Image (cartoon, rainbow, N blue to C red):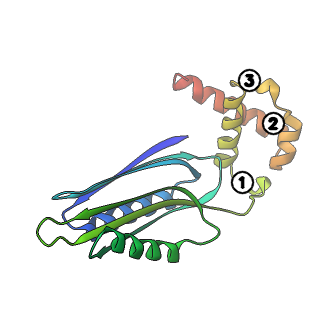
């Protein structure tokens, strides 16, 4: 499990949303795993500030993403209705929404109201054939299994694990040995 923090700030709503969306999409595209939890913080004023904190389970495959949108209206109700329409057109039935946040801001001089919405989601990927995984992915899954069993390799049926991954028992023993060495060297 890893934690990632994304932040953007700008005097322009569109620029702020573009910065957070582009940064998050770029980072998530290169990262394995599924978003487990997310917290979104919006603040308005002279500058718009967005902070998104996500936790990712690296052992669960999923396509991860974000939807951002904003609109303006003559009042909060008008702006929120327009925002709802924009976001709902982008949501697909395959998406699992992890978190969402909406907020409004009315400018002091023009009294124009802006509505901003952010949705964080996962799209489950097709089941991965375990015998097609590389060493890194296999060790990541084994490390997670060992972590769940307090790093006791005796609870694993090595023959069954080897068969599932399509490798030899020696490969699994070596993987476990390397995982335990790495854990020991990092002080875990």
- Where residue 157 appears, as percent x and y from the top left, is 86, 33
Instruction: Give the left or right position of residue 166, taking residue 70 as reference.
Output: right
Instruction: Give the left or right position of residue 147, taking residue 90 as reference.
Output: right
- Disc on the earlier residue, 3 or 2: 3
- Disc on the earlier residue, 1 or 3: 1
- Disc on the earlier residue, 2 or 1: 1
Q: Quadrant of the N terminus?
A: top right
The image shows a total of numbered marks equal to 3
Q: Secondary structure at mark 3?
A: loop
Q: Residue at x 15, y 59 (%)?
A: 46
Does residue 70 show up?
Answer: no
For the residue pair 85 and 128, the one nearer the viewer reads as: 85
Between disc 2 and disc 1, the foreground one is 1
Between disc 3 and disc 2, the foreground one is 3
Marks 2 and 1, how far apart at CA: 17 Å
The residue pinned by badge 3 equals: 152
Q: Residue at x 25, y 69 (%)?
A: 113
Position above or below: 28 against 38: below
Marks 1 and 3, how far apart at CA: 23 Å
Asked if the residue at tag 1 contacts the one at tag 2, i.e. Cβ–Cβ closer than 8 Å, the answer is: no
Position above or below: 151 against 110: above
What label does residue 133 carry, if any?
Answer: 1
Q: Secondary structure at mark 2?
A: helix
- Where residue 85 appears, as percent x and y from the top left, is 46, 76
The residue pinned by badge 2 equals: 170
Badge 2 local density, few (<14 within 10 Å), some, or many (20+)?
few
Q: Quadrant of the C terminus?
A: top right
Marks 3 and 2, how far apart at CA: 17 Å
- Where residue 101 appears, as percent x and y from the top left, is 42, 57
Q: Residue at x 55, y 71 (%)?
A: 91
């Amino acid at each position: 499990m890893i934690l990632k923090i994304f932040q953007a700030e700008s005097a322009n709503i569109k620029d702020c949303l573009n910065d957070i969306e582009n940064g998050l999409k770029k980072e998530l595209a290169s990262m394995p795993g599924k978003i487990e939890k997310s917290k979104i913080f919006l603040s308005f004023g002279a500058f718009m500030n967005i902070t998104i904190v996500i936790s990712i389970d690296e052992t669960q495959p999923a396509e991860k993403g974000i939807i951002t949108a904003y609109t303006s209206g003559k009042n909060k109700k008008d702006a929120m209705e327009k925002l709802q329409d924009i976001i709902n057109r982008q949501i697909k039935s395959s998406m699992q929404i992890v978190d969402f946040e909406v907020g409004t801001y009315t400018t002091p001089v023009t009294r124009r109201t802006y509505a901003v919405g952010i949705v964080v989601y996962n799209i489950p990927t097709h089941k991965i054939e375990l015998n097609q995984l590389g060493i890194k992915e296999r060790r990541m899954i084994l490390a997670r299994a060992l972590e769940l069993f307090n790093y006791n390799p005796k609870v694993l049926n090595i023959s069954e694990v080897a068969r599932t991954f399509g490798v030899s028992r020696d490969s699994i023993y070596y993987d476990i040995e390397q995982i335990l060495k790495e854990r020991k060297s990092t002080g875990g």
